[in-house]
Amino acid sequence: MSDINEASAYHENTSGGKTAFKDYVGKFAHIEDPLERRRLALEEIDNAGFGWTQIKMIMIAGVGFMTDSYDIFAINLGVTMLSYVYWKGKIPDSTTTLLKVSTSVGTVIGQVGFGTMADVVGRKAIYGLELIVMIAATILQCTVGQSPAIEFVGIFVTLRIVMGIGIGGDYPLSSIISSEFSTTKWRGAIMGAVFSNQGLGQLFAGIVAMILVRAYKDDLVFAKTGAECVGRCIKANDQMWRILIGFGCVPGCIALYYRLTIAESPRYSLDVNEHDDLEKVADAEAVVDAHAAEIVAPKASFKDFIHHFSQFKYGKILLGTAGCWFLLDVAYYGLSLNTALILQTIGYANNSNVYEKLYNSAAGNLILICAGALPGYWFTVATVDTIGRKPIQIGGFFLLTVILCVIGFAYHKLNEHGLLALYVLAQFFQNFGPNSTTFIIPGEIFPTRYRSSAHGISAACGKVGAIIAQTCIGTLVNHGCAKDKPNCWLNHVMQIFALFMFIGIFLSFLIPETKRLTLEEISEKYHGEIDTTKLGKDRYAPTTQEESYDSDLKQ
């Protein structure tokens, strides 16, 4: 009866982040047996429906991806604005590459660093810290200027690396926190919806860019070329890029309070923080049954991490998630090589003056995002829990292989409208395919003690692929080309990217299916751990403790 009184004394705190990421462990803290406490807490999460709690979860966790994709879109247009401020409209190729790749370098560091830290000190202790880094670096970028004492590019690139570290940390943290708090039935849809904020970030950036360029039209329209952009034209561009990039931290500032005030992940609390309590129960029961000692997973350590993933049956899963993400991001960059021609096809390549060049670039990219990328994200959200992760990923890799082969081998036979159709289809099947599933699967498939680290490693491999594509493969488009015939090798580059997608089909077979399985069932099935929630259910049949609990409540 004392348990009942303690249970009735519990008052749920729903302030801040706990309105979405609730304290499920605290709710059952009055249950003394750790196995039963674990079972009750996880059952409440796994059997929940889809409502406002899940929608708030998507909004809080999705902000980081909105900021990430906003920045990627914003810097592409921002580099053009910067070129008018510092380079008379003709920025060196090496500087352009440096400005764009620097964020990816930081992202790799953040994905591995924050991912590992979240497994060591907990999700709650880290969640929000990566957003603070992101916000601070973004604000500082907007205050940087050229002076005799400093080199603008050097300081700007350094700050973008720091910002990338914050962005990188958001990948494993938002994925695993969404996964560990989600209902089993709709876990894939929730994680997919969190990731789909990438598309919303691009949309948001495009709209902000169009509004800015329109607002400064009178200061831009008179300049026909970069050389003519002087005085108020330079000032307008200088103000626009700062506002455009700075606006990216606004959603993060709104969500920061909620991230800092979430409850600790119930899975982390029960599997890692309460590991010693479970071990005591296992040791006590091992006196009666020697197999009881096996119910507790090994304690997390670097040595155990190496031992676990050095076994092929477990290591192949990490190889699959990391390898597929690497292959995808190599080709993901490849599509952007066609953007200039696509914009020309839809009538947004006119650049008779500085205003038209900036406005058409923003508007044209916005149209392409709405045509292919956004629908792809939401098709994944709608079907990932019914079709499954693995079929969507394999199907996406297959269709991307076909599309890139057509572009590569028939490039000179395609007219502009045919290339536009293939480009939009590729954007669609990237997002209704491996771009979404490579994010979702690592957040589910690994055991709790290494879930964040393994996701961070997988995501970092993806960014390494993007860096290689931009710095190495992407430069091949002008291989052996005459100065008056640029991009003559583009068709062969598309063929190379098609090969990467083809390899991705087979690497995906290393990854198991996770739909409609609890995280504990996944760890039991694919990592050899025992699902203790089932043990708790067996030990506490309805005729014993739960039945007396119910009867006491009725009295």
Image: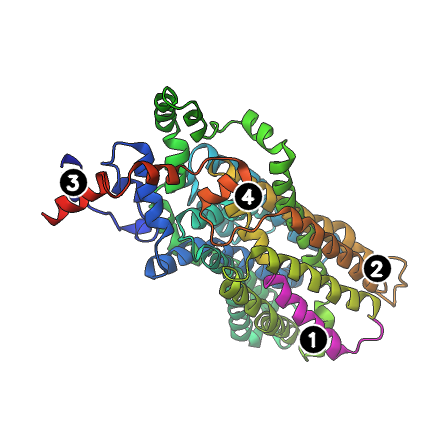
Q: Is residue 105 visible?
A: no
Query: Is mark 3 in CB contact (under 8 Å) with mark 2?
Result: no
Quick one: 121 or 4, which is closer to the camera?
A: 4
Where disc 4 sits, the SS reads helix
- Whole-percent x and y of residue 14? 26, 51
Badge 1 density bin: few <14, some 14–19, many ≥20, Cα 10 Å: few
| Residue shown at the point (69%, 51%) measured from the top left | 327
Q: CA distance from mark 4 to mark 1?
A: 34 Å
Q: Looking at the picture, which amino acid does disc 1 mark?
A: Ala
Helix, strand or loop status at disc 2: helix
Query: Looking at the magenta stretch, what is its main secondary structure?
Result: helix
The residues bearing labels 1 and 3 have C-alpha atoms spaced at a distance of 63 Å
* Residue behind mark 3: 4
In whole angstroms, how far apart are the C-alphas of marks 4 and 3? 40 Å
In the picture of the structure, the residue carrying the numbered disc 1 is 421
The residue labelled by disc 2 is: 478
Query: x%, y% of residue 467?
Result: 69, 49
Mark 4 vs mark 2, foreground winner is 4
- How far apart are the two marked residues, 3 and 2, measured between alpha carbons? 74 Å
Magenta-drawn segment: 411-433
Task: Tell me the amino acid under the disc marked 3.
Answer: Ile
Quarter of the image containing the N terminus?
top left
Residue 259 horizontal/vertical position (percent):
38, 48
Mark 4, mark 3: which one is toward the viewer? 3
Q: Amino acid at mark 4?
A: His
User: Which badge, 4 or 3, is on the more N-terminal residue?
Assistant: 3
Distance of mark 4 from mark 2, alpha carbons?
Answer: 36 Å
Check the image and name the residue furthest to the front.
543
102 vs 232, nearest the viewer: 102
Q: Which residue is mark 4?
A: 455
